[in-house]
Amino acid sequence: MALATEHIAIVAPCFNEGEVAVRFAQELEQVLARLEQRFTLVLVDDGSADDTPQRLLSYRPTAPNVALRVIGLPFNMGHQEAIHQGLLYAEGIDAQRFIVMDSDGEDDPGAIAELVSITDASVVFVARGKRSEGLGFQLGWRLYRIVFRLVARRALPFGNYSMIDRRALGAVLHRSFTHYAAFLSRLNVPQRSIVRDRRPRIDGTSKMSWRSLSMHAFRSLIEYGEEAVAALPARFHRAGSRVLAQHHRHHRREAVHRAPPFPAGPAYSAQRSSIACRSRGLLRLGLLLVEPCAAPRSRAAAALQRAHPRSLMHYPGGELELFKDARHWKRYWSGQAKPFVTGRVLDAGCGIGANAEWLMNAAVTGYTFLEPDARLLSQVPAFATDPVLAKGERINGTTTELSGRVFDTILYIDVIEHIEDAAAELRRAYGLLAPGGRIIVVVPAFQYLFSAFDTAVGHHRRYTKRLLKEHLPEGMEVARLRYLDSLGLLLSLGNKWFLKQGQPKAAQIAFWDRRVVPISRALDPIMLHSFGRSLFCVARKTAS
């Protein structure tokens, strides 16, 4: 049994909780007053915009074994960072163990008595039993657990509610985390768990939106990046190891003279370091090289703007053939686009025409392949097996040469990112659209993912929703705008930070297409398409 003099800190983030935070503290104090340990309640106000800070500061515990500390963050940093800041503060007091719990009432304070009685583990989780949320939330939670098990090869039946000792606290504060519970579950320390049902929230409502919950779920997958890849077949592990070994041999000499990736000494960013550590498992397998949004179009797309001579687009050749077989990815994004592909279709920068067959449907009455590279255009017949495609017009040129033509659908599939003045290109496309016609765009997402691959294939930029909207001409109404391939975003980050390779290998593309894309396809709706490494857009012409 724990000693009577033991000191335990309890960290609980609060955001716009108001009176709820006080009621939580009161209930918690009633539970703690019956225990023999000393407790310091560390309430972290995460930049609340209401009167939560004032209410917390006015609360005075009456139990002799309970003290209160209130930390005010200067702005809303997010739930996980609020936990981190609370633990940083709690490290400075003389506590031996540290409990993290939510302040909305769902975490049962009654579990603390059982928590503190367990002394043979560095981490003790409060696993979630029955939940009190609505059916929709519970279905989403169950689906998330299935996806997590597929990715991490283990279950994660608990949330933030847990207790750690100083040994575990040292790891938490030294290495940082993106998802507290998932991070703790990976620590190589003795762990135990107890089970408690989730209670209804004190005020009955959640402060987290579905998007916030989706992002929180995704962060747990980030913590398990290594485990996800470690479960790959051994033969791909060997292939990836060969790729990485070749990369190391190529760069070994220049690496001797290269500055370290992070500043030496204690001033370096712990969070960046932790992300680097979590990514190494992916690097060993050579999986962080694939960019799905590029290959079949890149050469052709760059030529859509004549200001860029083709001589500037240096391609080793071959990736057109590699990406044409990425069937899961093509099925995914084309499934998003096909309902909007109707009437007279212009496939701008069509490359070898490998995407056309995925977009064909009964509503298409005509198809025009537009490609400035005659060599690529000559390969279109091999993919134009549908009768409409076989009869389709093939034009060796750009949109500047189509004045007077009218189309119902104009496609820019992995093209716009290659054009320096993309807004001007989209304005030309707008002039070719019939009233009510649509422009469909697929582009790589998020500029912070810009890597050696983007440079190698001639990308000028990667897009966010906001930037793409800014490039659309007036008179266009966005009908659909969403990110695709959320899990693939991890691979892009690894390629940017470590491998920096511009040309993927067939085995890497095959793995990404067959293993990663199907998981992303299931995960993206759960995450509300709020992030991913590709951006899909449908815009409709409203003006005549």
Image (cartoon, grey):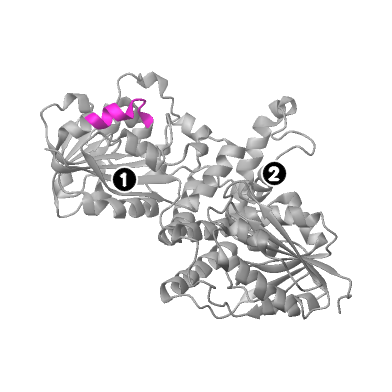
Q: How far apart are marks 2 and 1 (CA)?
A: 35 Å
For residue 527, side relative to residue 369 (left or right)? right
Number of numbered labels in the structure image: 2
Residue 106 lies in the magenta-colored region: no
Instruction: Look at the numbered disc 1 and give the secondary structure of its residue.
Output: strand
Q: Residue 537 carries which label?
A: 1
Residue type at mark 1 is: Cys
Residue at x 47%, y 74% (from the top left corner): 138
In percent of width and height, residue 535 lies at 38, 45
Name which quarter of the figure residue 9 lies in: bottom right
Q: Residue at coordinates 67% horizontally, 36% vertically from top-left? A: 248
Q: Is residue 150 visible?
A: yes
The answer to whether residue 265 is left or right of residue 412 is right
x, y percentage for residue 201?
53, 73
At label 2, the amino acid type is Ser
State the image coordinates of residue 47 (x, y, percent, origin top left).
Answer: 58, 51
Q: Is residue 423 magenta?
A: yes
Q: Where is residue 417 in the image (x, y as percent from the top left)?
A: 38, 33
Dominant secondary structure of the residues highlighted in magenta in the image: helix
Of mark 2 and mark 1, the one earlier in the sequence is 2
Q: Answer with left or right where residue 222 lies relative to residue 1.
A: left
Classify 43 as above or below 495: below
Can you tell which quarter of the image residue 267 is in?
top right
Q: Name the residue under label 2.
A: 273
